[in-house]
Image (cartoon, rainbow, N blue to C red):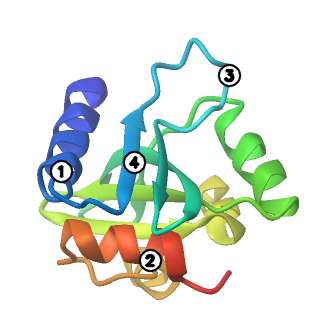
Amino acid sequence: MADSLERNLWSWFKRGTFRCRELDMERVENGVGDGTPDVDGCFEGVSFKIELKTGTITIRENLVRTKFRPMQLPWIKERTRVGGRVFVLLQIGRNRYLVAGKDCHEFKRKDLTLAELEKIAIVSPKCSQMDVLRACAHHPL
C-alpha cells in the first residue's frame, strides 16, 4: 500500500514539474543501495535528493506516523553532514511537508506531533510542485 501511495506522490511531483527546462530529475530504483533516496534531481544547477514518504496522523494524540527502512535516516544524516541537499517529502492526506535533512532525526521520535512537523517543514502543506523544487534547490540549510 505505501508503495502505491509513494508512486502517487511521485506522479504528483513529476506532473507539476515536467515542463521545467531548468530541471533534470529521475526516480531512483533502489538497487543502488540501502537508504538511497527515491528522487535524484538538479534544478538551476543545484543537486538534491528527496525521500518520498506517506503517513498518517493518529486521531486522539495528533501524532505523525510514517515508516523508514533501517538505513534511510542514517543515509540522510551522513549525506547532510557532508553538505548534501537531502529532503523528505511526506504526504499526509492532501497535505505535503518538505523536511530538510538536518531535521529528519525528528522522524525517529514516536511522539512527533503534527504541530511540530509543521514547524520543521520548509514549505506550506498546500505547496505546489514548484514550491518543493525551489526549496530543494535554494532553501538555506
Q: Residue at 16% across / 38% down in the picture?
A: 8
Give how far apart the Cα atoms at labels 1 and 3 are.
28 Å
Q: Which mark is residue 34?
A: 3
Which disc is residue 24 wearing?
Answer: 4
Q: Is residue 43 left or right of residue 139?
A: left
Residue for point 22% across, 52% down: 13
Q: Name the residue type under label 3.
A: Asp
Amino acid carrying label 4: it is Asp
Query: Can residue 141 be seen here?
Result: yes
The answer to whether residue 141 is above or below residue 11 is: below
Closest to the observer: 91 or 36? 36
Q: Which residue is mark 2?
A: 135
Q: Distance between the Cα atoms at labels 4 and 1?
A: 9 Å
In the picture, which quadrant includes the C terminus?
A: bottom right
- Per the rendering, the mark at residue 18 is 1
- Asked if the residues shown at circle 3 and circle 2 are in contact, with their CB atoms under 8 angstroms apart, the answer is no
